[in-house]
Amino acid sequence: MQISDPDVRLMLAFRKGDDSALSDLYRRWAGPLLRYLERMVHDHATAEELLQEAFIRVHDARSRYSPKARFSTWLFRIARNLALNELDRAHRRMPHITTDAAEASDDTRRPSLTLVSKSPSALSQVETRRTSSRLEAELARLPERQRSALWLAVVEGYAYDEVAEILDTSNASVKSLVHRARSALADRMSDRKAESARDANDETSEMRR
Amino acid sequence: MTDTRDPEDPKLERLDLLLSASLDDEVGADERAELANLRAGAEGETAERERAFREVDEELRALAGEPLDDAQLSNSLADLDAHLEARREGREASGASSDPSGFGAGPGLGARRLAIGLAAAAAVVFYLIVPSVEPPVEGTDSFPDARAVDPGVDAFAIDEGDDPSDFEEGDAVEDLVLAIGYGEENAEIGVIMGDDFEVIEQLELLDYLIALDGEGRG
């Protein structure tokens, strides 16, 4: 691992006792980590708690840290494991309730920082949100490993070997996970577009009558 | 397009895989050549699929949006500092304080782990010293609960973030830990196995400690 990596430098500084380095790391990674955790647990408040917990783990593990890999892959791995524990715990707390992730993410009332658009046009903003919430719902329906692999590769821009490190799997497995996730989303979005087009046609026909 | 695609077609499956990997710049030389061949065989379909993939990628990136503004980031960082500070103060007080922030949902997991560990150790000792404990009877509270066995945990192979709060524990156990004066840095107790927790449940030790705690407060 190159020492020129600013995250590694910060982490090593933090290990030596520079507390401000942890704050710098937090400023750099809180955003990406939070949006990833939101996709994992589908709840903003829980994602924020997990974000804090992830950095507390980093704080506690500072003396054991060694720069073998990118700092952020280590951080995302910690965060993912915390999220998996949380999901497992939530599942055990409510064994009688069928968890439908898609349903949960369809709830547009849920406040989500990620849906905030800075588009100038109100109409385009609404359209963007509609598309985003549809995609968000489809994304939530994917199996967790596919969702994570796709998000980390496409949105966070990690190479497959880094995603493999975060998910604790092989490079080939990541390639397959990303492909299946992408294909599934492409198919579902395409189906939805076809449905919307049919609905629009039906409405037009109704109006003509 | 999706109407005519056969998801079971191995050729299309392979094409999807290579297209997907090529979008992420993760194809080797052999795969690039293979993709070129497949493209030549189904140019229109390949182009349409690639466009659909790119659309997915663009919409995903749009979802990422603006994660945190400066004010949110500052507040969030202040929360983290407060958590860490509370823990630091808790340690300096040698565990004599029962500050709830030190044992809340976030930072107190180590202490909870220690509490459960100590309770489990006590239960094991009790179990060994008193071998004549009657076997649990089905249908009673002491019968092992099937929910205690969760195959999903093994499947995840989780190595960070384990949280013992799945188990019922009360203030009594935490008070016991604080009274003994252990710090969170001593929270790793490797000898406690999953089976021990079942023993705790069977012996109803936690209920006993909670009852003691209730009496003490009452």
Image (spheres, coloured by chain):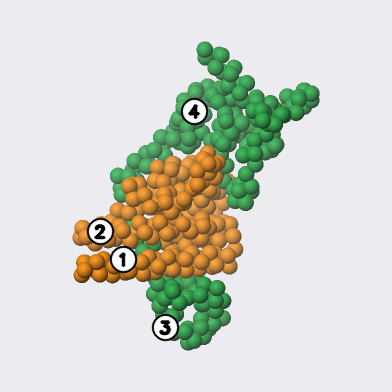
The percent coordinates of residue B131 (x first, y second) are 79, 25
Q: Residue under mark 4: which chain is it in?
A: B
* Residue in the picture at 51% in, 75% down: B6
Task: Kindly identify which residue carries mark 3.
Answer: B44
Numbered disc total = 4
Instruction: Identify the element where label 2 is drawn.
Output: helix
Task: Kindly identify which residue carries mark 4.
Answer: B90
Q: Residue under mark 2: which chain is it in?
A: A
Q: Colour of chain B?
A: green
Q: Are marks 2 and 3 in contact (CB under 8 Å)?
A: no
Q: Nearer the viewer, mark 4 or mark 2?
A: 2
Distance CA(mark 3)–CA(mark 1): 27 Å
The percent coordinates of residue B179 (x first, y second) are 58, 20
Q: Amino acid at mark 2?
A: Gln
- Rendered image quadrant of residue B127: top right
The percent coordinates of residue A18 (x first, y second) are 45, 43
Front residue (pair B182, B209): B209
The furthest residue to the right: B132
Q: Quadrant of the C terminus of chain A?
A: bottom left
Q: Earlier in the sequence, mark 3 or mark 4?
A: 3
Q: Amino acid at mark 1?
A: Asp
Q: Nearer the viewer, mark 2 or mark 1?
A: 1
Q: Are marks 2 and 1 in contact (CB under 8 Å)?
A: no
Distance CA(mark 4)–CA(mark 2): 48 Å
Q: Which chain is orange?
A: A
Q: Amino acid at mark 3?
A: Gly
Distance CA(mark 2)–CA(mark 3): 33 Å
Q: Residue under mark 3: which chain is it in?
A: B
* Residue in the picture at 57% in, 30% down: B168
Q: Residue under mark 1: which chain is it in?
A: A
- Rendered image quadrant of residue A128: bottom left
